Amino acid sequence: MSAPLERTVEAEWLDALPADDPRAARSRRDLVVVNRIMGSAGIVRRALETRLSTHAPRIAEIGAGDGTLLLGVAQACGWSRAQIVLVDRQPVVSAATEHRYCALGCSVTVEAADAREWLEGTREPYDAIVANLFLHHFETQALEAMLGAIARRTNLFVACEPRRARFPLAGSRMLGLIGCNDVTRHDAVLSVRAGFAGAELSALWPPRSGWTVQEGPAGLFSHLFVAHHVDGAGGT
């Protein structure tokens, strides 16, 4: 049996490029396709659907990017009157995407903010907080602080991240075959190497009573983490 891959976190090119850089715009379009291949929206939807009891949830996505992943989840779940908050340092949510949220009956707020600072600053409780391909950007200490802040704001947290294993790593090196640009190809390999395996996120989740956590592989390439406060009293 081959040795497990050691987790390494390196700066990704997309994070350093201006939001209006053509290569960044192309990479964000690539990521829509990559998320579709990974089945990210379906993974997140199933985790939420089985734990949310309302079609009008108050949900925040941290590291939301263009906001289209949670839009797909909202459409599939048939949410009406949902309150959606999209948080990203470089929000690139288009007017068309906002209009599609509104067409569902959802309100949408875009927050241009660092996720940790936003979590520490907001006083609003959320029915759920979602992260997709976001947590892997953080080293262990910063990640532990982020998870602690999340636990204070919600009773349900769902994260879909790259799975750190040899098969996903091999897949990340083949993205040129579907036309992904140099930024996407570079960052995909780094994302897998910074991804998660086993129960690494569970070990960093705050040890408070009432929480149940589930963690493990999801689909061919993803790693799913779900933390649910079963008594409905996790957030502030």
Image (cartoon, helix red, strand yellow):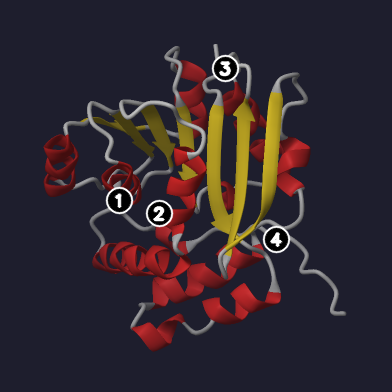
Disc 3 to disc 1, how far (Cα)?
26 Å
In contact (CB < 8 Å): disc 1 and disc 2? yes
**How far from the left and from the top, in percent, is residue 193?**
65, 66
Disc 1 to disc 2, how far (Cα)?
6 Å
Question: Of tags 2 and 4, which is closer to the observer?
Answer: 2
Q: Which of marks 4 and 1 is nearer the N terminus?
A: 4
Q: Name the residue under label 4.
A: 8
Label 2 secondary element? helix
Q: Please name the residue shown 40% across and 88% down the image.
A: 177
Q: In which quarter of the image is residue 198?
A: bottom right
Q: Earlier in the sequence, mark 2 or mark 3?
A: 2
Residue type for callout 1: Gly
Q: In which quarter of the image is residue 103?
A: top left
Left or right, 13 with respect to 73, comes to: right
Left or right, 110 with respect to 42, comes to: left
Q: Name the residue under label 3.
A: 232
Question: Of tags 4 and 3, which is closer to the observer?
Answer: 3
Residue type for callout 3: Gly
Q: Which of marks 3 and 1 is nearer the N terminus?
A: 1
In contact (CB < 8 Å): disc 4 and disc 3? no
Front-lying residue, 10 or 134: 134
